[in-house]
Amino acid sequence: MSRNLVAENWRLERSRYLLVGNKCTECEKYYFPNVQICTDCNISKLDEYVFSGKGKLIEWTKIYEVAKGFELFAPLYYGIIELEEGVRVAAQITEVTDDTKLIPGIKTQMVFRKLFEDGSQGVLTYGFKAEPQI
Ligand SMILES: [Zn+2]
């Protein structure tokens, strides 16, 4: 594992493990991951916000040729999810048994799962994936 990966994991720890973003105190716009300044109001007064993880599928794709470390998940489903707060996130879709049921608009729930492993070191990285609520 590279030093950069360790640093990145620590920096993103709260957003990866708790689905934490923030919300503008002025216009109530949500952000994930969190930002320092609201892009609509141009102010820096934002409160931490923990997202429910409930959302809907916007679009998805199926990836057959996966990067090293993702072989366990191949073929891999990846999609755009719109959380109920209006924020869109890109996430791996998990627990897919029949991809004909992956219809844009179906409900999803963000769930905490293993994302990948570093083969040489055996380091596991966890984070959120989207689980269809079919
Ligand atoms: Zn704002």
Image (cartoon, helix red, strand yellow):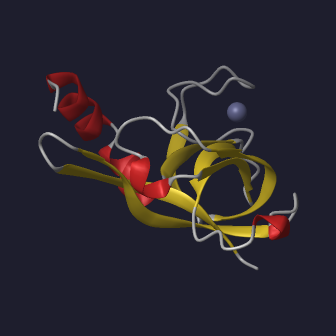
- Name the outermost residue toward the front: 65
Q: Decide: is 99 above or below 63.
A: below
Q: Position of residue 130 (x, y in %)?
A: 60, 61
Residue displayed at 76% across by 50% down: 86
**Is residue 24 something that shows in the picture?**
no
**Is residue 23 something that shows in the picture?**
yes
The quarter of the picture where the N terminus appears is top left
- Asked whether, in this view, residue 87 is left or right of residue 120, the answer is right
Q: Decide: is 91 above or below 102.
A: above
Q: Nearer the viewer, residue 44 or 63?
A: 63
Of the four image quadrants, the one with ligand 1 is top right
Residue displayed at 74% across by 72% down: 98
- Asked whether, in this view, residue 85 is left or right of residue 3, the answer is right
Q: Nearer the viewer, residue 26 or 66?
A: 66
Q: Position of residue 76 (x, y in %)?
A: 58, 51
- Asked whether, in this view, residue 8 is left or right of residue 80, the answer is left
Q: Position of residue 30 (x, y in %)?
A: 66, 44
